[in-house]
Amino acid sequence: METMRTLGRTGIEVSALGFGCWAIGGEWQAADGQPLGWGKVDDDESVRAIRRALDLGVTFFDTADTYGAGHSERVLGRALGKHRAEVVVATKWGNVFDEESRTLTGADDSVGYARRALTASLKRLDTDYVDLYQLHLSDADPERAAELRDTCEEFVREGLVRAYAWSTDDPSRAAVFARGEHCAAVQHMANVLQDAPEMFALCAELELASINRSPLAMGLLTGKRRTGQALEAGDIRSRPPQWLRGFVDGSGADPEWVGRVDALKEILTSDGRTLGQGALAWLWARSPHTVPIPGFRSVAQAEQNAGAMAKGPLTAEQVAEVDRILGR
């Protein structure tokens, strides 16, 4: 398969697979103590995993200022080091957090905050520009978002940002950002269990990259998460917020979702793929605009995710069979 994809209309080339850097931020929390990370991490292992991904042809890394309350950006900056110019770095802004206590404290959609957040991200990432700057407030007011889009255009003119996007699951909101010349993408939820037909249609119509978060359904599509298997206390999946589907409070994976994964296993593991590689292959087959960004916390996970690229997308027949099994 084509191992490279273009970010929308920008001409910025990225590997067809990106790496999502939420998990490597480590533990952080909401003001009420709700965990927002994926549990404990080993920063040295995260750095090794990022460098291994580079060796395997991954050139796109997606983080956010709030992941680990700044920690993910710092780890990514450290790992990239002298390779910075060879990769495309995406980060996000809009959430307000306290680095000391690693706590999310609120949100700020003001124009002034966007600039302060960008300045802080550049410092943590140890770089003087961000390739893709993304609004992280999925349900921000569209009129305010239009102002922020214009602010992002200023950042582009100043050389601080190459392109920008909105992380939202609402196609009408994504379309507001897409009116900007240097809008390159929309980041949205999509995986074989949670299709996003309207968003894929919008990306095709407006020539946007479709950056897919939760491409492995928060781990359900790796096959490692089973019903009744509890998660560590610092893991967001142990006390899933309302938007996090497929997990049950305190008891791990939702049996109904596990059943769906089991029903798809034969197709997704075809041609020697692991289950997770098959889930990524479905996304590539679903649209020519997709760039899935699975998370990782180890070199082994980095190798397995990157290995999906060599096997390419599922066939049209396999995609149709998936729809049939899921009753879509």
Image (cartoon, helix red, strand yellow):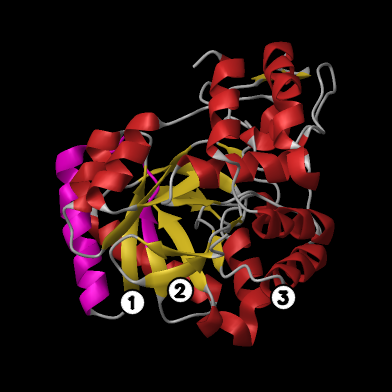
Residue 36, percent from left and from top: 61, 39
Q: Specify the quadrant that holds the N terminus.
A: bottom right
Answer above or below: position of 189 versus 16. above
Q: Quadrant of residue 24?
A: bottom right
Answer above or below: position of 227 versus 15. above
- Who's the residue at 70% across and 25% down the image? 264
Residue 104 visible in rendering? no
* Residue sitting at the far bottom: 82
In the drawing, does residue 131 fall left or right of residue 276?
left
Residue with the mark numbered 1: 160
Q: Earlier in the sequence, mark 1 or mark 2?
A: 2
Q: CA distance from mark 1 to mark 2?
A: 9 Å
The magenta span reads 133-157
Q: Earlier in the sequence, mark 1 or mark 3?
A: 3
Identify the amino acid type marked 3: Asp
Are the residues tagged 1 and 2 within 8 Å (C-beta)? Answer: yes
Q: Nearer the observer, disc 2 or disc 3?
A: 3
Residue with the mark numbered 2: 122
Residue with the mark numbered 3: 55
- Who's the residue at 32% across and 46% down the image? 203
Identify the amino acid type marked 1: Leu
- Residue 156 part of the magenta-drawn span: yes
Residue 144, percent from left and from top: 18, 45
* Residue sitting at the far front: 317
Residue 258, percent from left and from top: 73, 19
Mark 2, residues whose alpha carbon is within 10 Å: few (<14), some, or many (≥20)? some
Residue 122 visible in rendering? yes
Give the main secondary structure, helix, strand or loop, of the magenta stretch: helix
- Who's the residue at 22% across and 54% down the image? 148
Numbered tag placed on residue 291 in the rendering: none
